[in-house]
């Protein structure tokens, strides 16, 4: 049996319009509605109900059918015409069953036959209010995703810019110029990557297509791919659901996931540099003690996870990559840049950190 406490947990923030021409019935049930809704507006006929609806909006409308001046059917038609998603519950006498098909056509899904059974009333209201709460939560989630997507797009533009700067620096290194760059310059105390470190992460690698790599690989590539996919799914869950308000445990979950991913990538033998960069990034994450920092870095972390997903599909699943290392430099660059930002933030919290150990611990 439905409990009124369950109803209140969903209805306490909602508003209601109750339209009933019988004053005794209206006053009686108004007392119930005022106990479960944030506010309740009363009307004695369809015309009064429609006038009040036009001047305000309500989460739920509860109405009788047979009323003077304007009946419930006409009022509902007006309301649905203006707001097709309006939640409506209808109270009806037994001899008004002929109206039900018309009401169903209008989109009304809940009916209460007079005299109204109290338990039935609670059950119907609980069903409506629960659906309204879920719809509200869904819309809020969609709005949050849209905001995050806009924020992520801006961050990705910045990452692309920094990628070009890193590539230019690597070209200079290939000409044996002595270069020392600071990634994400101007954001905190960015970690400096020396010529030795950059050469380690960007060596000259022979090109090989994905299909050739799969055909010549002697290990259990299906098991490795399945494990990588499982880690990606875990990362997606943590990033989208837990990093809105992260905890220290969430930090460790993300860090362990990247280190685990690096371990399995290393088993593919030809991706040791990519594996080392991912592992180094995971180790740096483990040193983060301020959960709010991970919240600020959410878009960067998502970008790396998304790139790993794209890489795995092109190389191990679809096997259509012309070069198995087509994304290595981009992913390595993103790991280095994000690690640089994390290292700078960690320096602000502790002057004793030896940032050189982030790569060679």
Image: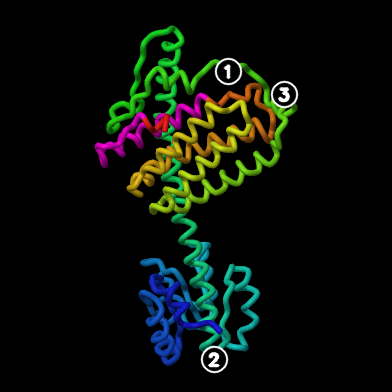
Label 3 vs label 1: CA separation? 15 Å
- Front in this rendered view, residue 149 or 342: 342
Q: Of the residues under marks 3 and 1, which one precedes in the sequence?
A: 1
Disc 3 crowd, CA 10 A, few/some/many (<14, 14-19, 20+): few
Image: magenta residue range: 329-356
Residue 268 placement (x, y as % from top left)? 63, 31
282 to the left or right of 265: left
- Return the residue at label 1: 205
Disc 1 crowd, CA 10 A, few/some/many (<14, 14-19, 20+): few
349 to the left or right of 58: left
Which tag is nearer the camera, tag 1 or tag 2? 1
Q: Residue at x 45, y 32 (%)?
A: 335
Marks 3 and 1 close (CB-CB < 8 Å)? no
- The relative height of residue 336 versus residue 345 in the rendered view (above or below) is above
The answer, for residue 119, to whether it is visible in the render is yes
Residue 63 placement (x, y as % from top left)? 49, 79
Q: Residue at x 34, y 44 (%)?
A: 293
Q: Which quadrant of the view contains residue 44? A: bottom left
- The relative height of residue 143 versus residue 36 in the rendered view (above or below) is above
Q: Residue at x 37, y 20 (%)?
A: 194
The answer, for residue 82, to whether it is visible in the render is no
Q: Quadrant of the N terminus?
A: bottom right
- Return the residue at label 3: 212
Q: Please name the predominant secondary structure of the magenta segment in the image.
A: helix
- Return the residue at label 2: 115
- Front in this rendered view, residue 299 or 291: 291
Which tag is nearer the camera, tag 3 or tag 2? 3
Residue 22 shown in magenta: no
């Amino acid at each position: 049996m439905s409990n009124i406490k369950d109803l209140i947990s969903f209805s306490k923030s909602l508003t209601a319009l109750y339209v009933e021409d019988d004053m005794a019935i209206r006053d009686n049930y108004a007392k119930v509605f005022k106990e479960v809704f944030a506010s309740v507006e009363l009307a004695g006929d369809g015309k009064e109900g429609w006038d009040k609806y036009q001047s305000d909006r309500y989460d739920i409308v509860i109405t009788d059918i047979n009323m003077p001046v304007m009946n419930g059917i006409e009022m509902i038609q007006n309301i649905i015409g203006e707001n097709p998603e309006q939640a409506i519950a209808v109270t009806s006498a037994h001899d008004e069953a002929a109206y039900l098909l018309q009401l169903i056509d209008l989109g009304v899904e809940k009916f209460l036959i007079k005299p109204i059974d109290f338990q039935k009333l609670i059950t119907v209201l609980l069903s409506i209010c629960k659906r309204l709460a879920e719809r509200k939560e869904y819309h809020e989630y969609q709005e949050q995703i849209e905001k995050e997507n806009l924020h992520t797009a801006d961050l990705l533009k910045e990452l692309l810019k920094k990628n070009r700067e890193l590539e230019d620096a690597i070209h200079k290194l290939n000409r044996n110029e002595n270069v020392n760059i600071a990634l994400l310059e101007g954001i905190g105390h960015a970690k400096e990557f020396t010529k030795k470190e950059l050469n380690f992460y960007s060596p000259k690698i022979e090109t090989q297509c994905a299909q050739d790599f799969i055909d010549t690989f002697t290990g259990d590539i299906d098991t490795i791919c399945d494990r990588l996919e499982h880690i990606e799914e875990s990362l997606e869950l943590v990033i989208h659901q837990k990093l809105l308000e992260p905890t220290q445990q969430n930090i460790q979950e993300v860090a362990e996931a990247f280190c685990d991913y690096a371990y399995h990538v290393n088993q593919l033998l030809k991706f040791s540099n990519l594996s080392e960069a991912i592992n180094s990034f995971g180790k740096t994450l483990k040193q983060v003690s301020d959960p709010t920092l991970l919240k600020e870095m959410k878009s960067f972390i998502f970008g790396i996870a998304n790139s790993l997903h794209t890489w795995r599909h092109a190389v191990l699943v679809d096997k259509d990559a012309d070069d198995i290392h087509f994304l290595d430099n981009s992913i390595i660059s993103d790991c280095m840049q994000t690690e640089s930002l994390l290292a700078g933030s960690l320096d602000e919290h502790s002057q004793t950190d030896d940032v050189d150990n982030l790569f060679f611990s």
